[in-house]
Image (cartoon, helix red, strand yellow):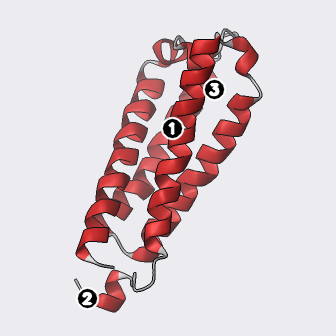
Amino acid sequence: MSTAVRVVLRGGLGFLLATQLVIGCWALLFPRAFFAIPWVGMRMDYNEHLMLDYGALSLALSVVLIAAVVVTTRSLVQIALTSYLVFAVAHVVIHARLLHHLTQAEATSLMIALGAAVAIPAGLLVLTTRPGAKSRSQSGP
């Protein structure tokens, strides 16, 4: 993997990591405040258990992202990005079915944000499959 590709991957992974850390800590430490965001609570009944689980899951995903930022081998980056994409694609599909709880502006903003949450890791994943994108163990440090 070239140095330029590794820099872009680390930057993108770092962004995904930062968002997961912030969201995870917020949902875990302040679940009611996190749920109060219209995109999150969607005007439904508050569920503390769900918010705590979501926060914990976000922090767990952060561990994989941290490893990918630090180590940055092709296989680890692909695992981290694929894990993130499994969540992000399911998340956008789930929310697309629940837009009736939101105003038009909220729904539009949410779908843009969730679309970006799919596009960013998908774009980064493409970088790992480019010809000549060898893992660090194959190309040296």
The type of residue carrying mark 3 is Leu
- The crowd level at tag 2 (other Cα within 10 Å; few <14, some 14-19, many 20+) is few
Residue 57 visible in the current orientation: no
Looking at the figure, which quarter contains the C terminus? bottom left
Q: Position of residue 103 (x, y in %)?
A: 64, 9
Q: Which mark is residue 140?
A: 2
Name the residue tied to disc 3.
50
Looking at the figure, which quarter contains the N terminus? bottom left
Residue 101 visible in the current orientation: yes
Judged from the image, the secondary structure of the residue bearing numbered disc 2 is loop
Residue drawn at x 52%, y 66% as measured from the top left: 79
Q: Earlier in the sequence, mark 1 or mark 2?
A: 1
> Eyeballing the image, is 114 above or below 139?
above
The type of residue carrying mark 2 is Gly
Q: Earlier in the sequence, mark 3 or mark 2?
A: 3
Between residue 84 and residue 67, name the one nearer to us: 84
Q: Position of residue 4 (x, y in %)?
A: 25, 70
Q: Number of marks in the image?
A: 3
Name the residue tied to disc 1.
56
Residue 97, quarter of the rendered image: top right
Residue 65, quarter of the rendered image: bottom left
Residue drawn at x 50%, y 41% as measured from the top left: 116
Task: State how far apart marks 3 and 2 are (Cα).
Answer: 44 Å
- The crowd level at tag 3 (other Cα within 10 Å; few <14, some 14-19, many 20+) is some
